[in-house]
Amino acid sequence: MKSLNPDTIHPPFARYSHGIEMPPGKRLVRTSGQLGLAADGIVPSDSFAQAQICFENIDFILAEARMARADIFHVSAYVTDRAHMTGYMQARDIYFQKRSDKDLPSSTLVIVCGFTRPEFKVEVEVWACGE
């Protein structure tokens, strides 16, 4: 994968790439949106903890496809309020902390009016590519 961050446009606002070029012949995986719902049914009250669960769930899904977080090339996230952006972004930055600034996935973050249950504050889905 190749990050695309042309000097002719404003740099990304956070740790993500404006675009990603995919090499030919790779397998693709797309996850459904993951909510901050732990395996035991617990939903933490804060957006950071919910986002951490979302990313943990994504790790499990990718592992089933013999992929890992290094294979993620795009992240879409949804939060129910601007107040939840900081918690989500902290969790995302921790999740991708081992990736260099030249190897970050593209990213979309959208504020939505809500999810299926009112306690959910964050939802995250990814695209990944592997051998």
Image (cartoon, rainbow, N blue to C red):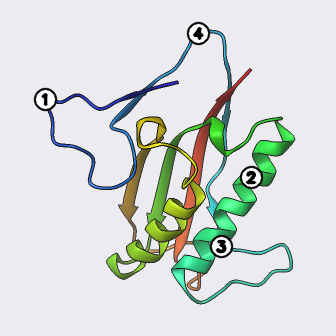
Disc 1 residue type (three-letter):
Thr
| Image location of residue 54, percent across then percent down | 65, 64
Relative vertical location of residue 53 with respect to residue 127 in this rendering, above or below: below
The residue under label 4 is: 24
Q: The residue under label 3 is which amino acid type? A: Gly
Instruction: Determine whether the residue tagged by mark 1 lies in a helix, strand or loop.
Output: loop
- The residue that label 2 is drawn on is 59
Q: CA distance from mark 2 to mark 1?
A: 34 Å
Task: Name the image quarter holding the C terminus.
Answer: top right
Closest to the camera, between mark 4 and mark 3, is 4
Q: Is residue 116 visible?
A: no
Q: Nearer the viewer, mark 2 or mark 1?
A: 1
Task: Say which residue appears at 61% left-offset and 76% top-offset.
Answer: 50
Q: Do tag 2 and tag 3 residues touch (Cβ < 8 Å)?
A: no
Residue 36: assigned label: 3
The tag earlier along the polypeptide, 1 or 4, is 1
- State the separation of the CA atoms marked 4 and 3: 34 Å
Disc 1: which residue? 8
- Asked if the residue at tag 3 contacts the one at tag 1, i.e. Cβ–Cβ closer than 8 Å, the answer is no
Check disc 3 and report its element: helix, strand or loop: loop
Tally the numbered discs.
4
The residue positioned 83% from the left and 35% from the top of the image is 66
Frontmost residue, 116 versus 7: 7
